[in-house]
Image: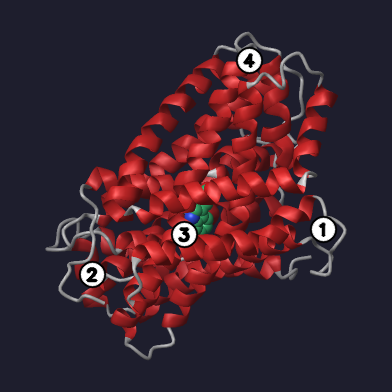
Amino acid sequence: MNRTTPRSQWASRIGFVLAAAGSAIGLGNIWKFPYITGLNGGGAFVLVYLGCILLVGLPIMMAEFLIGRHGQKDAVGSFASLAGERSPWRMVGWMGVFTSFLLFSFYAVVAGWSFDYIVRSATGAFQGKSADEINAIFGQLVTSPVQVIFWQAVFIVATVGIVVGGVRGGIERWSKILMPLLFLLLLLLFVRGMTSPGARAGLEFMFRPDFSKLTPNALLDALGHSFFTLSLGAGTMITYGSYLDRKADLFTLSLRITILDTLVALLAGLAIFPVVFAAGLEPSSGPGLVFQTIPIVFSALPFGSFLAVLFFLLLAFAALSSSISMLEVSVAYLVDEKGWGRTLATSLMGFFAFVIGIPSALSFNKLAQFTPFFGRTFFDFVDKLVSSYLLPLGGLCVALYAGWFWKADAEKRELTGDGDRAWIYPLWHLLVRFIAPLAVVVILLNQAGLFG
Ligand code: TRP
């Protein structure tokens, strides 16, 4: 490795905020948040989710940024420079590299569907079709191995194309294009939702809490999702934080990123639920909510094809800016620790993710009946492994390191610099020391089936 070349940094604060918000805002916000809100009965779930974001998500995000910024290296290298070259804490970094790579491999499969849906909507494939016919189109897509793998490959190539360009020229530049476009499209669909006949029902569903609908499982869903949606526990925010300069105010920046992520999830809900109610569909239809109900809803509206194209474009942009952050974790590891060139590291990891992702792509068709993984398909297995175990475990380790093991004076200096906003440190420290770890332990025990 050429040690005289300075390591890359973000060109601007706003570029960093958009890139990190781009990582956070993804399929989690637009595809998953609406359907889990639907399954968990709306308002009360939304409140709990907001609480988890503020009390657990935000503090852990700050911890990841602090670790990365202090270490000025990839996830493994950052732990090595904080805790020592031989420290077992480096395991947390390796786990992050592994987790984000695995996540990328199956995320690309679902993201690929959104590419397919852009083309279908643009060519009017949903126009004038009945609900059953539209459901059949979804079925036909996912059961066709060739189509799914084709779009998965296209999506990975797009991701690699951006990450090869580096931190400034690739990730930051593209985030500055994709994110504003995404906000614009979302605002348009939000206005469409608010002017649809279902607006009232949609608003009430999302904001009138009915606490009788709150099950213990809803609490855990809310907590688990707050990790996923903020891209925590997989080394992603450590890696992004490592490209920050010493002076950046991490509390303010994390707060902005968290607010943007939350705003997009809420706007996505407010764009989707009104049209769902106006069309008399069920909000609790599950993972198919977006892919199956959106075309149904839009096919019946004036300018329906156009709106559907916008919607799936939005989904694709959101997924792309998230997947580049997943790929960057392993690329940064290979570049920083092994001295590889960026182009080689990115292309190779992209290719491996494609290969490892093939059984995920085939889980909806050729391998749908192949379930040796605790009775699950390969896709369901890796999804469960990553979302329910590896992410919370990664987040737990980060909280424990920041809460109990990092030397307080160094940590405090990293967070508050020359003493601006000194009040934030004790509050943050309390959250990462006690509240966040406790919450995560509860999720993990629940996932392991301890609470039935
Ligand atoms: N946060 C993204 C979403 O909501 C997904 C994501 C990107 C992610 N990078 C991550 C999730 C790292 C966990 C860890 O879709």
Q: Which residue is mark 4?
A: 304
- The amino acid sitting under disc 4 is Gly
Q: Which residue occupies 23% across, 47% down?
A: 13
Lower sequence index among marks 4 and 2: 4
Quarter holding the C terminus?
A: bottom right
C-alpha gap between disc 1 and disc 3: 26 Å
- State the residue in front, 443 or 364: 364
Horizontal and vertical percent position of residue 154: 56, 45
- The amino acid sitting under disc 2 is Lys
Mark 1 vs mark 2: give the one in front: 1
C-alpha gap between disc 2 and disc 3: 31 Å
- The amino acid sitting under disc 1 is Leu
Lower sequence index among marks 1 and 4: 4
- The amino acid sitting under disc 3 is Leu
Is 104 rendered above or below residue 345? above
Disc 1 and disc 3 in contact, CB within 8 angstroms: no
Q: Which residue occupies 19% across, 69% down?
A: 413
Is 170 rendered above or below residue 434? above
Q: Which residue is mark 2?
A: 412
Horizontal and vertical percent position of residue 231: 48, 55
Lower sequence index among marks 2 and 3: 3
